[in-house]
Amino acid sequence: MLLLCFAAVLLLAVLVSSLAGRTILSTAVLFLVAGFVLGPETTGVLDLEPGSPVVSVLAELALFAVLFTDGMRVGWSDLRSAWRLPGRALGWGLPLTLAITALAAHFVVGLGWPESLLIGAILAPTDPVFASALVGNEKVPARLRHLLNVESGVNDGLALPFVMVFLAVAAGHDCLHLGELALELTVGVAIGVAVPWIAIRLERTPLFAASTKYEPLNAMAIGLLVLALAQTLHGNLFLAAFAAGITVATFGPAQRAAFEHFGELIAEVLKLAALLVFGSLISLEFLAEISWQGWILAVVALLVARPLALALSFLRSGLGPREQLAAMWFGPKGFASVVYGLLVLESGIPAADQVFHLVALTIVLSIVAHSSTDILVARSFEGADLTAEPTPTAQGAGDA
């Protein structure tokens, strides 16, 4: 039944995608709403629970694919060419967003510090897919699009270690367990770097070469091998995926270019399927269980945490007011936050259910708000005089 529902919603999304690109409609919202309507506590068409194997497996595969393709967007050469604004957003904006959200979770909702910091880490990453009209519109300044793309491509992976550490602390794990976690993260990164590097080096030897037909499958094969080895050697799947994507982008630009479109489609399909499943876990009863303090936290996370964090991060940055406001607003809580929330739910920590409720509420509000306003903000840049604005490369070189 899940496959049937997903196929039907996917076809509908394809048919309305052109309209969605010109209006406030959003395919992400379509899958979220479809999951909500079909969920067990609404119509009961989909009989899914947070602990169902299909939920965890699909979430893991989707996040692995998303982090792998995200990593491919941010090879070292890309970061060196225009690092100043993304560096501010990642180096200052990410930890400040985490801290402000954690403060709200502790003082407004009353959660303990480990759980509050965990919520901050889960909600810190952003996802430009829910603001695609802004990121993909050439009328929007290039440096703003570059900023949002690089930031979202990197912050999922940067937030992951914080999520894992705060989750372990919230679970009451001792130093021995934290050491095992550090080993798991290290093994994941090592696999993610070594496998692509070796594969790309092999392809450059006289004995091996990928045919034109199989070139797009090269990076996919690398990704699958990284996934299998990380599972076998008990490395962290997600850090392995992110490290592998960056390694391919850095050492294999040809492999990156061949896989880019194909990989984006795979990640998008898995992401939409996971959003359908995530939506099915939400219901009116689910939302009614959240206290008014929880609703305040969600509003603070969206309207205060990121805007304030980026306002501080971009002081004296030279970023124009219109661009800065757009960057401050478009911090949608994306797919990585969905999966991190599911990881908390599966962890069995005492506050797991409460944390998941708060995370889910914030993500739902974010998807609806950001996906329905991206086209409006993108249009506000049309006709603006952008000739005086430096390109991302010029900015990075000038600041260096």
Image (cartoon, rainbow, N blue to C red):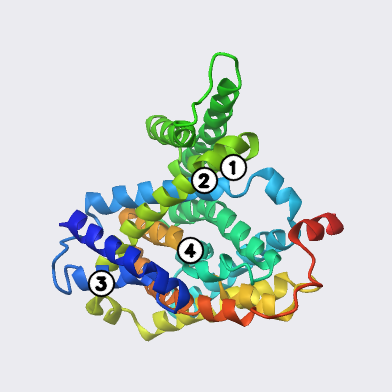
Q: Nearer the viewer, mark 3 or mark 2?
A: 2
Q: Amino acid at mark 2?
A: Glu
- Secondary structure found at label 4: helix
Q: Earlier in the sequence, mark 1 or mark 4?
A: 4
Q: Which residue is mark 4?
A: 129
- Secondary structure found at label 2: helix
Q: Amino acid at mark 3?
A: Phe
Residue sitting nearer the eye, 231 or 293: 231
Q: CA distance from mark 1 to mark 3?
A: 35 Å
Q: Is residue 107 left or right of residue 47?
A: right
Q: CA distance from mark 4 to mark 3?
A: 20 Å
Q: Earlier in the sequence, mark 2 or mark 1?
A: 1
Q: Is residue 400 left or right of residue 337?
A: right
Q: CA distance from mark 3 to mark 2?
A: 32 Å
| Residues packed near mark 1 inside 10 Å, few (<14), some (14 to 19) or many (20 plus) | many
Q: Which residue is mark 2?
A: 260
Name the residue located 61 percent from the left edge and 22 percent from the top edge. Answer: 204
Q: Position of residue 365 (x, y in %)?
A: 41, 77
In the rendered image, is residue 63 in sight? no
| Residues packed near mark 2 inside 10 Å, few (<14), some (14 to 19) or many (20 plus) | some
- In this rendering, the answer to whether 359 lies above or below 215 is below
Work out which quarter of the rendered image holds the N terminus and state it: bottom left
Q: Which residue is mark 3?
A: 36
Q: Position of residue 98 (x, y in %)?
A: 56, 66
Name the residue located 52 percent from the left edge and 36 percent from the top edge. Answer: 192
Q: Earlier in the sequence, mark 3 or mark 2?
A: 3
Q: Is residue 161 left or right of residue 51?
A: right
Q: Are marks 1 and 4 in contact (CB under 8 Å)?
A: no
Q: Amino acid at mark 4?
A: Val
